[in-house]
Image: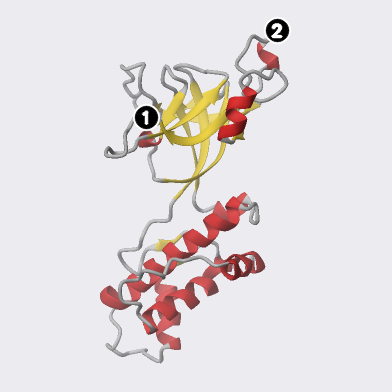
Amino acid sequence: MFTAQELRNQMAFALDAENSDHYRDDLDYIPAINAAMKWLTSVVGSAYGKDKIGEEFFRNLSYSGVFLTSNTSRVSLDVFPSEVWTILGIYVNVETGIKPGVPTPSTPDINRSYYLNNLFHISSADSCKRLSIEEWAFNKENPFESGYDGNQLCDALKAYSYLNPLNYQGDVFSYLTQEIEIRPAIKNKNLTIFWTKKPDEITSLTDNINFPNSVFQMLFDKALNYIAYKQGDQTNIYSVTNQDVQQLIGVL
């Protein structure tokens, strides 16, 4: 992790703009850094989706939370305390602790899911396997696969799974509320989700940039490129190439 000020100072040196007002913080440096962060977020997402980088990359952006599922065994992304970038893992049958001084949230509607901010995760032996849409349908009737929804001889034989966030209720003209579904169903029960939040845009140079130090040079190069060669409507600034992904892999 490093500050936006460190990146800005390095950019000013490269531009030979120290003690100059040719480039302004609010109009040039901060927008360029934010644009570079969005681009790098796209690169990281592409590399992670291809299993090219590990979860340790997200250490400054990783969180866990205890949630109460709805009566459809789902958790809505709307109830997360931060914008979700990617799901790292989900555990059921969790042991939790109570945070001192945090009031118990009200959960009056069994049709909804809730973030239980008064609880924290301690342990669980039951992780959920992430399934594709095709696997989700196939595994429902297969007693040898995760997500089997039939009768088991005992709870210890249950192998849980989850489906990536999907919109189950909205139409193409409505705001799409995405939900994570768990199977076998755990209706109105607690679970723990580990996730990474999307990096926040900076608003001042004192803000931290929550990427590892190893990608400082990549951010610097892209921000410098943007500030030196502004792209008008920015239509291509966040495009990701295979070379970008390979460069990221190389520095990690």
Above-or-below relation of 76 to 223: above
Residue shown at 38% from the left, 39% from the top: 81
Pointers 2 and 1 in contact (C-beta within 8 Å): no
Q: Residues within 10 Å of mark 1 (few under 14, many from 20)?
A: few
Q: Residues within 10 Å of mark 2 (few under 14, many from 20)?
A: few
Point out the tag, 2 or 1, that comes first from the N-terminus. Answer: 1
**Label of residue 101 in the image:** 1
Which residue in the protein does label 2 denote? 153
Q: Which is more foreground, mark 2 or mark 1?
A: 2
Tell me if 113 is positioned left or right of 139 in this view.
Answer: left
Q: Looking at the rendering, in which quadrant would you find the C terminus?
A: bottom right
Residue shown at 70% from the left, 16% from the top: 157
Above-or-below relation of 31 to 104: below
Q: Residue 75's x, y, as percent?
A: 43, 29
Residue shown at 55% from the left, 57% from the top: 46
**Label of residue 172 in the image:** none
Identify the amino acid type marked 2.
Leu
Helix, strand or loop status at disc 2: loop
Give the total number of marks visible in the rendering: 2
| Colour scheme | secondary structure
Identify the amino acid type marked 1.
Gly
Q: Residue 151's x, y, as percent?
A: 64, 9
In the image, 66 versus 39, the foreground residue is 39
Residue shown at 55% from the left, 34% from the top: 133
Helix, strand or loop status at disc 1: loop
Tell me if 251 is positioned left or right of 120 in this view.
Answer: right
The extreme right residue here reads: 144
Tell me if 165 is positioned left or right of 175 in this view.
Answer: right
Q: Residue 154's x, y, as percent?
A: 68, 9
Residue 128 in sight from this viewpoint: no
